[in-house]
Image (cartoon, rainbow, N blue to C red):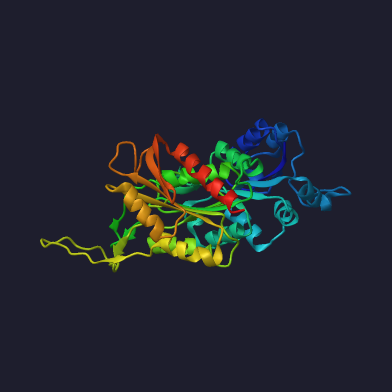
């Protein structure tokens, strides 16, 4: 198995890094721990030394003939640099090329894949500087395991706590041991709803949970693909992917998708599973609309048609890309899905009747019909993970057919 360097920076989540190291060892990996000075305030190096059975590296300038180049040796030998927890400070160092300790020097010296598991206060995570640094690192190919939501050590509630050790280990496994014919392929998936704000309190949305899109992203990752996941507001945790882009409104999702197709390496498949709003309030009111005794009339404007715009772009920028759309209908399922496929230049449409039990939004199962140029293939009720597998089987066949 692989030799993994586990970087531990100075956050309270450092205690979870002990379980991450143990979990990696259970998968057969060799683990070498590198601790920043701040990390040692939370967990002692002796703990990691006892678990990993390797000397823990804590100082860039330890005495010894080869101490000053040890980060080069480790950089050459490691199969993955995993930093858990990754604090705002270490993320900033990585993004801006600082090398004032062993861990940041190691990042600059290694050519191995890098994975970060951020952990910090919810406001720190949301800060523009931190988000910009994370975006910079993602653009360089750094993988990010999204932090969890809930009670934080500071007493606040929100997103920012270190992902659970088993989630981090699973993300490492998916990165180091991809399987399937999608190995090395680039796949873009959209998931979840969009929320179109009416005023600071109210919005227009739908009941999509994101489960179907997340299942597709997870299955594509399991098959070895490098997945970009563009997700609207969801209560379900997204799977570990190469790049996660969070959006709220249809215009934001449109910009995130189209922006990643302009001037970048082509995607092998684009799977549009998101339930994007067709209409949005023509104008958002800055203050809460006050209730009166009169009826309220809303003016709705058409939102950008992401699937149609992508379909128009493909012949020029992504000629061999496979394009998959989704259609949630309540009647005339196959006819409407086929018309949508032709109109929006999709290779096939995954359609479901949202009125059918066990199908549609916010459930663990789905009942779909895959509509392509050769006809309609109905799939009986099954888990969304199994539906995702069937969709990607078809995507793989199309990719192979296109060389």
Image spot of residue 283 (x, y percent): 29, 69
Image spot of residue 136 (x, y percent): 59, 61
Q: Judge left or right: residue 248 versus residue 302.
A: right
Image spot of residue 210 (x, y percent): 41, 47
Does residue 369 appear in this view? yes
Q: Judge left or right: residue 39 versus residue 150.
A: right
Quadrant of the rendered structure where residue 205 is? Answer: bottom left
Does residue 226 appear in this view? no
Residue farthest to the front, as pictured: 374
**In the rendered image of this protein, does residue 201 appear above or below residue 48?**
below
Q: Judge left or right: residue 348 versus residue 357.
A: right
Quadrant, the N terminus: top right
Please tell me which residue lies in front, 108 or 403: 403
Quadrant of the rendered structure where residue 23 is? Answer: top right
Residue farthest to the right, as pictured: 65
Q: How many numbered circles does the render carry? A: 0
Image spot of residue 239 (x, y percent): 51, 44
Please tell me which residue lies in front, 294 or 175: 175
Residue at 46% from the left image edge and 49% from the top image edge: 159
Please tell me which residue lies in front, 133 or 214: 214
**In the rendered image of this protein, does residue 358 appear above or below residue 129?**
above
């Amino acid at each position: 198995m692989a030799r993994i360097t586990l970087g531990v920076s100075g956050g309270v989540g450092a205690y979870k890094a002990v379980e991450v190291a143990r979990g990696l060892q259970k998968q057969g990996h060799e683990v070498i721990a590198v601790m920043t000075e701040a990390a040692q305030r939370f967990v002692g190096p002796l703990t990691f030394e006892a678990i990993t059975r390797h000397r823990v590296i804590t100082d860039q300038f330890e005495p010894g003939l080869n101490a000053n180049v040890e980060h080069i040796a480790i950089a050459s030998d490691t199969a993955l640099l995993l930093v858990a927890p990754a604090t705002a400070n270490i993320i900033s160092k990585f993004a801006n090329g600082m090398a004032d300790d062993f861990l940041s020097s190691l990042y600059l010296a290694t050519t191995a894949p890098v994975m970060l598991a951020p952990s910090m206060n919810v406001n720190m995570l949301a800060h523009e500087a931190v988000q910009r640094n994370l975006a910079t690192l993602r653009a360089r190919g750094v993988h990010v395991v999204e932090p969890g939501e809930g009670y934080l050590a500071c007493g606040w509630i929100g997103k920012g706590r270190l992902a659970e050790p088993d989630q981090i280990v699973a993300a490492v496994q998916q990165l180091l041991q991809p399987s399937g014919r999608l190995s090395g392929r680039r796949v873009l998936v959209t998931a979840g709803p969009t929320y179109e704000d009416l005023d600071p309190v109210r919005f227009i949305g739908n009941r999509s949970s994101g489960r179907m899109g997340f299942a597709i992203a997870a299955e594509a990752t399991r098959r070895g693909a490098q997945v970009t996941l563009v997700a609207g507001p969801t209560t379900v945790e997204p799977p570990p992917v190469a790049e996660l882009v969070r959006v709220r409104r249809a215009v934001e999702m449109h910009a995130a998708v189209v922006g990643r197709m302009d001037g970048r390496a082509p995607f092998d498949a684009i799977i549009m599973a998101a339930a994007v709003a067709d209409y949005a309030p023509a104008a958002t009111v800055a203050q809460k609309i006050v209730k009166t005794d009169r009826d309220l009339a809303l003016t709705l404007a058409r939102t950008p048609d992401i699937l149609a715009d992508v379909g128009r772009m493909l012949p020029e920028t992504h000629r061999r890309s496979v394009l998959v759309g989704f259609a949630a209908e309540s009647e005339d399922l196959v006819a409407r899905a086929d018309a949508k496929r032709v109109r929006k230049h999709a290779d096939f449409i995954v359609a479901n009747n949202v009125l059918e039990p066990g199908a549609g939004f916010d459930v663990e199962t789905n009942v779909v019909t895959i509509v392509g140029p050769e006809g309609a293939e109905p799939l009986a009720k099954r888990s969304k993970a199994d539906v995702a597998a069937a969709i990607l089987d078809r995507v793989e066949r199309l990719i192979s057919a296109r060389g």
